[in-house]
Image (tube, helix red, strand yellow):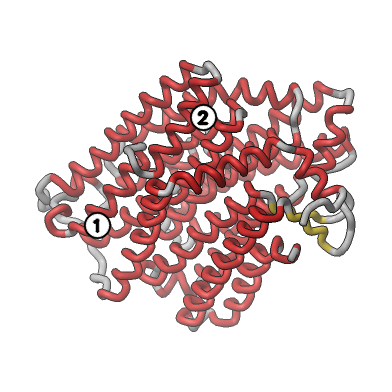
Amino acid sequence: MKLLVAMPILLPLFAALAMLPFRERPAVQRWLALASSVAQAIVAALLLAQVYAGGVLALQAGGWAAPFGITLVADLLSAVMVAAAALIGLTTSIYSLGSIDHERERFFFHPLMQLMLVGINGAFLTGDLFNLYVWFEVMLISSFVLLALGGTPRQLEGSVKYVTINLFSSAIFLSAVGILYGVAGTLNMADLSARLPAIEQRNLLSVVAVLLLVTFGVKAAIFPLFFWLPASYHTPPVAVSAIFAGLLTKVGVYAIMRVFTTVFTGAESEAIFRILLWVAPLTMIVGVLGAAAQYDLRKLLSFHIVSQIGYMLFAIAIQSPLAIAGGLFYIVHNIVAKTSLFYISGIIREKSGAFDLKKIGGLYSTEPLLAALFLVSALALAGIPPLSGFWAKLMVIRAGLESGHSFVTGAALLVSLLTLFSMTKIWNEAFWKDDPGVAKVTGAALTDGRMAMLYLPVALLCGVILFFGLSFEPVYELSARTAAQLLDVGSYRNAVLRGGGS
């Protein structure tokens, strides 16, 4: 059963390798990618069910016991994030069937997408900090190539900014890992959680904590380290933008939540949480103001990624069980809603010929299904009841009020109103106003079959948003249990170091 922990990494890895001989047969690559994504979704569901029923699962690769070997760990937090990644991987595979051109497929679009899922799942499941660095690099290499694939000047400009800042953060991460190993003699997260309280060099630990926050902050696009994201995420094909928007920044948020809850549990983490209480409202406000100023649909949505990260940081900084539960629910809700909105931006481009809102109009009357799907996703992002975003924001804001952080809570409420304003702006410009009749650049019209491949993932994600909103109780129960398990570091440590897991 413990082999189940490794399957979310092995499945996309084997799928990517299996596709390599089929460069000139893109149809084979497409169906291998889809089959792999379906298998990952099934494995992720089984893993979540197993961890929910039996507790933390730990796998020691090669039989070397922790902290000497490579450890993979699945607790509820990891299992939920792997399940979310599997859902987005599956919908992106379907969306790619209708949107990715033959030339990109010849240059290994599908294997690269699978390789990126290897890195994402590895980051969620790893039990030590050095391997977290390795999985970050796997993600960086594959995402950089996906970003540059196509070779347009705009893509190259965006990918250079993306890779430069991420290489900078990788260097900081490696430095922090080196210092930490020199101080503690281990990089296994469970072992670190046991050893760090006895380390006397507290100043060095504080330096390491700040370096790690900078590293993960770059990945998560927190204030003021976010500028690379809106400069790059609007340049690649929509399928790539969507999976980046849904998953990549959340890996950074996951790393902040994991490291400063499981590994650092003393004064260093308290200092980081105080920093986050300042960074969170700035991230929310700067992101939403940037979005309000945009008319390019994908740039607008990219700035909103930054804004929404602020809510997650706020939840992590509070550290109460309700805040952690709300933060986790917020992460999953945002992954689903944000990916759906990026998919919709691609359909708008296919229907209207532009991403520029000033050149689009009249879609409400010509595309009523698209309008309905946009409303579900946009209103969920803005936090309108009874959709998923309402419950996620309610939990975070209630936790903020209970903890006495009224200033940040007020900022979160204000940003919610501005988010609704941005979504209303898209609605008014793209759907409600008349088509301005501006000449646009259009490609070949998609067949009905390929267009269905664009609509199907959006419909699936909107179904998830409605389920989360209308069936809140089981989702809350899972979030609450995840928060309780995350804050109980002893159960994690016991499963990894003493084989106490199932």
Q: Residue at x 38, y 48 (%)?
A: 470
Reading the image, the residue beneath label 1 is 370
**Residue 231 lies in quadrant:** top left
> Dot 1: few (<14), some (14–19), or many (≥20) neighbours within 10 Å?
some
Residues at circles 2 and 1 in contact by the CB criterion of under 8 Å: no
x and y, in percent, of residue 369 in the image: 22, 59
The number of discs equals 2
Q: Position of residue 50 (x, y in %)?
A: 66, 59
Ranked by sequence position, the earlier of labels 2 and 1 is 2
Alpha carbon distance from label 2 to label 1: 33 Å
Label disc, if present, on residue 223 of the rendered structure: 2
370 sits to left or right of 328: left
Q: Which type of secondary structure does the marked residue at label 1 adopt?
A: helix
Q: Position of residue 250 (x, y in %)?
A: 54, 45
**In this rendering, the label closer to the viewer, 2 or 1:** 1
Q: Residue at x 23, y 70 (%)?
A: 445
If the image is split into quadrants, where does the C terminus sit? bottom right
Disc 2 residue type (three-letter): Phe
Residue 292 seen anywhere in this rendered image of the structure: yes
User: Whole-percent x and y of residue 475?
Assistant: 50, 47
**Residue under the point 46% across and 27% down:** 397
